[in-house]
Image: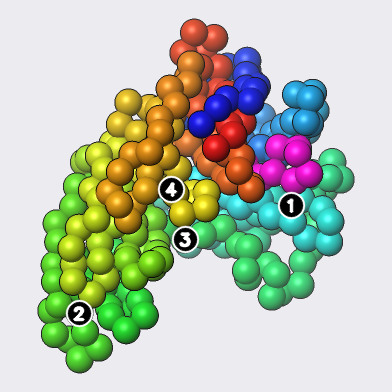
Amino acid sequence: MRLLYQYDFNLEKVWPVDYASVPYMRDGSIYYAYNDGKNGIRTIKIEKGGQNSQMLHVKDALDYALPYRWRLFEFQNHVLLSCGNSDEPTEAFPDRRVCNIFLDLDDGMRKVSLPDEIAFRYQCRQPICEEKDAALSDVVMHYKSSRKYQCLSPDGEVLWEEKHQGYRYTPFEVKNGCVIFGTAGMGGGLYCYDLQSGIRKIALRTLGTTRYVWVRDYIVCRGDKGQLVLVDPFAGKVMDELQLDGMLTDESGIIASDNQICVVGFHKKSQSPTVYLIEV
């Protein structure tokens, strides 16, 4: 892996928990939306040469989801940000409302309305519900406890069960006959099991894998020292590592486009959130 360039925000000394949305890449440009902690949602667009422009949208906090649930996507040749709130009102927040909010990042962050089908597809994701079974191919992944899953046949027979560190933060993904997922909190790692036999292909300690991306048949995610790692989950090997001059956390947004990775970290020396563009 090779660093192509990086862009430091140089805004305020805030760790990346407030900078947790996933970037978006189009035609060599990078779009990134974040909560600046004071005035509201900002968007940075970084062009191929590293030039950037910023836009600001002042927000009502009750109407917006937390940044780690935001989604950037393309619709009718415009990049949009989905940031509407998906939490029901509670006793602590009785005025909270469920709503879809979409901002057009190619038109000054103007609010736009979308067809119901598109709005539903790109609404902010709800957190994973651990207590629900997940049907995968011809088996079912059953939630046994916060750190244990059972793989069941359709008629409920236990085929295998495995323990893992942390709580599951990613969906189950099936590829090459294996089930893959990431965990975080109270540990955390990247896991890959043979779906039929339960043989463990990899259990990589990362201290938190809430996001990962595919580049060909490899996974790119954060490592346990805040570095970027390139993993062959089926062979159980770390193929490459890249230690950036900033730290990645389990909240770091990451996206892949062709053979390039865009990831957001935190540059300790400048105390600045940083966007890194990496060639794999």
The disc, 4 or 3, on the residue closer to the chain's N-terminal end is 3
Choose between 107 and 51: the one closer to the eye: 51
- Which mark is nearer the camera, 4 or 2? 4
Judging by the rendered image, the residue that carries numbered circle 2 is: 152
Q: Residue at the spot x=13%, y=67% of the render?
A: 161
- In percent of width and height, residue 27 lies at 78, 44
Q: Distance between the Cα atoms at labels 1 and 2?
A: 40 Å
The quarter of the picture where residue 21 lies is top right
The quarter of the picture where residue 234 lies is bottom left
Q: Is residue 181 above or below residue 194?
A: above
Q: Contact, CB < 8 Å: mark 1 with mark 2? A: no
Kind of residue at disc 4: Ile
Q: Is residue 12 above or below residue 77?
A: above
Judging by the rendered image, the residue that carries numbered circle 1 is: 80
- In percent of width and height, residue 250 lies at 39, 37
Write the start and end of the magenta stretch as one range: 19-30
Judging by the rendered image, the residue that carries numbered circle 3 is: 126
Choose between 16 and 209: the one closer to the eye: 209
Judging by the rendered image, the residue that carries numbered circle 4 is: 219
Kind of residue at disc 2: Leu
Q: Is residue 41 above or below residue 202?
A: above
Q: Residue at the spot x=71%, y=37% of the render?
A: 30
Q: Distance between the Cα atoms at labels 1 and 3?
A: 19 Å
The residue carrying pointer 2 sits among few (fewer than 14), some (14 to 19) or many (20 or more) residues within 10 Å by Cα, namely: many
The disc, 4 or 2, on the residue closer to the chain's N-terminal end is 2
Quarter containing the C terminus: top right
Question: Considering the numbered disc 3 on the image, is that residue within a helix, a strand or a loop?
Answer: loop
